[in-house]
Image (tube, rainbow, N blue to C red):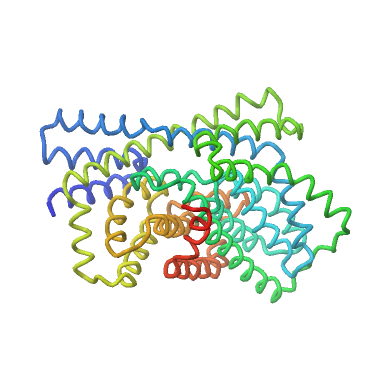
């Protein structure tokens, strides 16, 4: 390894982060400083600019702004409320029913919108006051909302799985989408187990059992929203459209739904489009600088040397996966998900493929690790949104978060060492 270049890359990146430089600029500048060591200044700047520009020249990336737009429409389009009412009809009468409602609604809304932040905001905005009114501890409600919101990044459709597909060099997006179902549902069930035990100990109240008529009405109200998953995922699997085309279909579908629900008007479009543009710009800049940094690392042979170093420690898949999981959990605490996927996929994917790990399986492992990081300080975006919606400080939420973290890590370990949990569904569909 060129230790000088690797040292400059890591130290400059950490210095920029400590100075509170936005992460996209920290990544780009540290990549530039590293490249300057190997070539003159002007060629370094030109090369980095070219890599950033060409990194965005991808048809698959077009899906991201479309899914972001669909998520924005859903966030304002009355979908969250209908999903909550449907979830209440299913699990409301169980011990800890409202906590279960929070988790299921986050899973459904997160899966439909593809955004953990949107799920934490939309579902938390409804559920936190409702749970507090019924006597639930405010910090516990926020903790449940924060952790369950991340399931939408594993259960498809998911922008981050599209980014992993790009970073991995073309792993099938459809296969990744299918691979996320069982792990995402397992996390939801594990969170429900903890919430149920907590609610039973605290003797929290339950909802009344609803009659069949009310249940059927709530199901019909939620059905159009749930059908979006069938349309998007079903269309991709059936080969009717690509993931990118599916994202455009999702936008049309959500607009029709939101206008049919009369939850948004033409006057809301400017705000929705502006928020979508802002979010897309941030994501695309992160992608451009992260891909540029990945190229610099490849140019300096850093991934190959890291791979050799890890394999020198052990060639046992169990040991290698333990090390990689620990690194990714640590990375998730300090780095946002998009740059983490783009930077560390080229480093770790060759290692795991060398020891026989399927790239689809590894993609789910990586996303599950980084989802846990979204719930942890100092850069956990879902943690900040969930605390903001609940109007609580981070310190008050940490304690009830701990048992939820533990079960998320337990599920991560199970999924890591039982590959069929990720691969069975894609294989069943022929991927």
Place of residue 359 in the rendered image (x, y in percent of width and height, measured from the top left):
37, 55
Q: Quadrant of the N terminus?
A: bottom left
Q: Give the answer, above or below, for where 369 lies relative to 312.
A: above
* Residue in view at x 75 percent, y 64 percent: 135
Q: Is residue 157 left or right of residue 4?
A: right
* Number of numbered discs overlaid on the protein picture: 0
Q: Give the answer, above or below, for where 431 lies relative to 187.
A: above
* Residue in view at x 43 percent, y 38 percent: 283
Q: Give the answer, above or below, for where 127 lies relative to 28.
A: below
* Residue in view at x 85 percent, y 63 percent: 208
* Residue in view at x 54 percent, y 45 percent: 237
Q: Is residue 405 left or right of residue 365?
A: right
Q: Identify the residue at the far front of this view.
A: 430
Place of residue 243 in the rendered image (x, y in percent of width and height, measured from the top left):
50, 39
Place of residue 370 in the rendered image (x, y in percent of width and height, measured from the top left):
43, 56
In the figure, residue 305 lies in which quadrant? Answer: bottom left
In the figure, residue 295 lies in which quadrant? Answer: top left
Place of residue 303 in the rendered image (x, y in percent of width and height, measured from the top left):
22, 53
Q: Identify the residue at the far bottom of this view.
A: 201
């Amino acid at each position: 390894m060129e230790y000088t270049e690797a040292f400059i890359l890591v130290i400059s990146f950490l210095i920029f982060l400590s100075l509170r430089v936005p992460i996209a600029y920290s990544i780009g500048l540290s990549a530039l400083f590293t490249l300057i060591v190997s070539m003159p200044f002007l060629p370094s700047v030109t090369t980095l600019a070219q890599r950033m520009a060409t990194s965005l020249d991808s048809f698959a990336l077009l899906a991201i702004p479309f899914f972001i737009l669909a998520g924005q429409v859903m966030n304002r389009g009355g979908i969250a409320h209908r999903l909550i009412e449907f979830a209440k009809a299913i699990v409301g009468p169980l011990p800890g029913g409202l906590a279960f409602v929070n988790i299921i609604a986050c899973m459904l809304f997160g899966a439909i919108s593809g955004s953990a932040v949107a799920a934490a905001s939309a579902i938390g905005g409804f559920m936190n006051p409702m749970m507090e009114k019924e006597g639930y501890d405010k910090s516990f409600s926020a903790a449940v909302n924060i952790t369950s919101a991340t399931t939408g990044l594993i259960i498809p459709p998911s922008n981050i799985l599209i980014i992993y597909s790009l970073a991995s060099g073309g792993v099938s997006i459809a296969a990744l989408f299918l691979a996320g179902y069982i792990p995402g549902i397992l996390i939801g069930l594990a969170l429900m187990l903890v919430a149920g035990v907590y609610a039973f100990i605290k003797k929290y109240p339950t909802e009344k059992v609803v009659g069949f008529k009310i249940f059927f009405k709530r199901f019909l109200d939620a059905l159009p929203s749930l059908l979006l998953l069938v349309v998007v995922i079903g269309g991709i699997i059936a080969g009717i459209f690509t993931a990118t085309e599916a994202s455009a279909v999702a936008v049309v579908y959500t607009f029709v739904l939101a206008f049919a629900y009369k939850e948004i008007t033409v006057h809301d479009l400017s705000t929705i489009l502006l928020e979508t543009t802002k979010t897309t710009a941030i994501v695309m800049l992160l992608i451009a600088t992260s891909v540029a940094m990945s190229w610099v690392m490849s140019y300096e042979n850093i991934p190959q040397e890291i791979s050799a170093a890890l394999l020198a420690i052990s060639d046992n898949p169990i040991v290698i996966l333990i090390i990689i999981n620990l690194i990714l959990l640590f990375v998730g605490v300090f780095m946002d998900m998009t740059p983490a996927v783009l930077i560390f996929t080229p480093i770790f994917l060759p290692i795991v493929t060398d020891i026989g790990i399927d790239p689809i399986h590894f993609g789910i492992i990586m996303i599950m690790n980084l989802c846990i990081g979204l719930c942890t300080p100092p850069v956990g975006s879902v943690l900040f949104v969930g605390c903001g919606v609940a109007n609580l400080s981070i310190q008050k939420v940490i304690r009830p978060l701990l048992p939820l973290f533990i079960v998320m890590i337990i599920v991560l370990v199970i999924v890591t060492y039982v590959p069929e949990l990720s691969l069975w569904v894609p294989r069943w569909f022929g991927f």
